């Protein structure tokens, strides 16, 4: 019996020691949690400067609380006044330190009910378990059972390390396009499938000189792959004049990296002009819009023949076919006979502005030219030798083969301001600001986005009527 007792005691001791060792090993390994991390803290180790990456304020109180739009983020205010930061996995050596950060534990029993109204439709969503982090205090956490594919490490000083884990290269492309929501709007293709089943926690843009900036939900990240930022922001101003070389989509399933080459203009105007443009006046003159022209003219008391006359003037009067010396000879300095040529010339069907790169395509979509441009100077616009109170901003390329596309001169208006843009281009600076002298005489392109919507063309028509018919009242 004594021998058996000795054996049992030994076995018990072995089990106790094994359990003890296992517990010590578990403690040494630490734990993984999902955590609400403020933007500044999340991006501190990822970008060049995160100091201005504050919470994103919202005036609608709906987008911040709609998971389909703000997925991967969280908000602390139940009213939805802002987006506070990122939900992301974190490795911690000791769970007991987490309450000191200021958050609270979210468990399987946690539940948040959020009701939103979008496009007139009210819907209620119940967030349970880890999903309840969507509306919880900063640094709140949910303990994970398994190690995530990507995570940050909580350092002893309360900061977070760089993202660790899997990285996947994406084959795709990105271009700058016009959009009223931001100065620089990026359309990314090739990432949707990879990100279909996972929220984007953050996006890092890396410039060719190594500058890194972080993006925030709704303000910069829209439906995962739609990206935009304002050039007057101190955060994104760091990209001015550089080229975006890489886009990193940070998710709990890993980081998805896409190599790109996107120029960010160093100028104040070009970022607002990003997009592809076609001739405005042929679109103006479409029969489907004539009733709206008449409606706008009627607001100034113009009806019948008077309205028809003004309509003809404001469409056909800017669809001339002569420019330069031919126009000067034809019009002979008679304002009553002049007709402006507001078409794209030199075989162009469209012009595209992307960062500091301007390109043009013909009727078949073949690229006619592509060059990088830099701002030179602003010149006063004159007509019959008199200043008209506006300027053209002149841009030049250093490419020796640019020919007739060496210089571009833009009026200061943007799509956001006037619904259309005006510009001219050529191989000389001589008389580039004159409306009636030299090779640019009586020629100024009027252009609108190639993908314009009816609301935009109508806003442009109303503006044009207000500027012309309105001055006669």
Image (cartoon, rainbow, N blue to C red):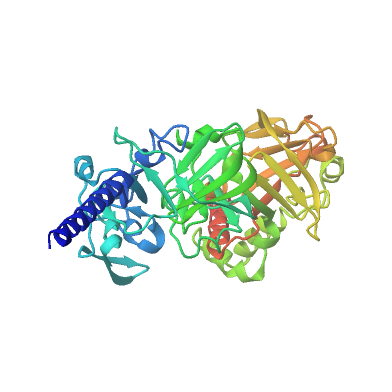
Q: Is residue 17 above or below residue 146?
A: above
Q: Is residue 45 above or below residue 349?
A: above
Residue 436, horizontal then vertical, whole percent: 76, 37
Residue drawn at the location 56% of the way across and 46% of the way down: 247
Q: Nearer the viewer, residue 387 or 261?
A: 261
Left or right of 397 on screen, residue 237: left
Q: Nearer the viewer, residue 128 or 58?
A: 128
Residue drawn at the location 62% of the way across and 60% of the way down: 451
Q: Nearer the viewer, residue 143 or 316?
A: 143
Q: Nearer the viewer, residue 366 or 206?
A: 206
Residue drawn at the location 35% of the way across and 39% of the way down: 41
Left or right of 51 on screen, residue 339: right
Residue 457 sits in which quadrant? bottom right
Left or right of 278 on screen, residue 246: left
| Count of numbered badges drawn on the protein | 0
Look at the image and tell me whether residue 413 can be seen: no
Classify the position of the N terminus by image quarter.
bottom left
Left or right of 327 on screen, residue 20: left
Residue 227, horizontal then vertical, whole percent: 51, 51
Look at the image and tell me whether residue 240 can be seen: yes
């Amino acid at each position: 019996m004594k021998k058996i007792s000795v054996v049992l005691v030994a076995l018990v001791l072995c089990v106790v020691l094994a359990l003890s060792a296992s517990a010590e090993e578990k403690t040494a390994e630490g734990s993984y949690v999902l955590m609400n991390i403020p933007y500044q803290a999340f991006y501190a180790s990822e970008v060049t400067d995160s100091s201005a990456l504050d919470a994103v304020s919202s005036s609608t109180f709906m987008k911040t609380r709609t998971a389909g739009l703000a997925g991967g983020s969280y908000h602390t205010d139940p009213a939805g006044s802002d987006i506070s930061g990122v939900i992301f996995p974190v490795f911690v050596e000791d769970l007991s330190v987490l309450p000191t950060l200021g958050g609270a534990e979210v468990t399987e029993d946690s539940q948040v009910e959020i009701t939103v109204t979008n496009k007139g439709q009210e819907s209620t969503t119940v967030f349970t378990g880890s999903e309840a982090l969507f509306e919880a205090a900063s640094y709140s956490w949910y303990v994970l059972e398994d190690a995530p594919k990507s995570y940050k490490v909580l350092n002893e000083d309360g900061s977070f390390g760089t993202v660790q884990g899997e990285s996947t290269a994406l084959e795709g492309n990105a271009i700058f396009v016009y959009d009223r929501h931001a100065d620089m709007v990026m359309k990314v293709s090739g990432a949707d499938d990879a990100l279909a089943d996972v929220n984007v926690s953050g996006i890092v843009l890396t410039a060719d000189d190594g500058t890194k900036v972080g993006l925030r939900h709704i303000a910069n990240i829209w439906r995962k792959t739609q990206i935009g930022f304002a050039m007057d922001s101190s955060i994104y101003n760091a990209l001015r004049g550089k080229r975006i070389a890489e886009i990193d989509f940070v998710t709990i399933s890993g980081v998805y990296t896409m190599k790109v080459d996107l120029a960010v203009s160093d100028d104040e105007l070009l970022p607002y002009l990003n997009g592809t443009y076609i001739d405005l006046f042929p679109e103006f003159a479409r029969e489907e819009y004539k009733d709206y022209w008449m409606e706008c003219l009627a607001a100034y008391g113009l009806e019948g023949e008077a309205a028809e006359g003004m309509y003809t003037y404001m469409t056909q009067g800017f669809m001339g076919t002569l420019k330069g010396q031919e126009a000067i000879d034809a019009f002979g300095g008679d304002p009553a006979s002049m007709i402006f040529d507001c078409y794209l010339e030199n075989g162009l069907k469209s012009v595209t502005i992307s960062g500091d790169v301007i390109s043009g395509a013909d009727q078949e979509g073949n690229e006619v030219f592509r060059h990088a441009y830099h701002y030179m100077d602003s010149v006063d616009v004159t007509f019959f030798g008199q200043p008209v109170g506006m300027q053209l901003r002149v841009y030049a390329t250093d490419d020796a083969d640019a020919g007739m596309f060496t210089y571009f001169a833009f009026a200061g208006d943007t799509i956001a301001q006037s619904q259309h843009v005006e510009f001219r281009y050529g191989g000389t600076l001589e008389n580039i600001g004159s409306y009636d002298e030299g090779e640019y005489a009586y020629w100024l392109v009027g252009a609108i986005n190639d993908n314009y919507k009816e609301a935009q063309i109508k806003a442009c028509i109303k503006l044009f009527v207000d500027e012309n018919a309105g001055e006669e009242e």
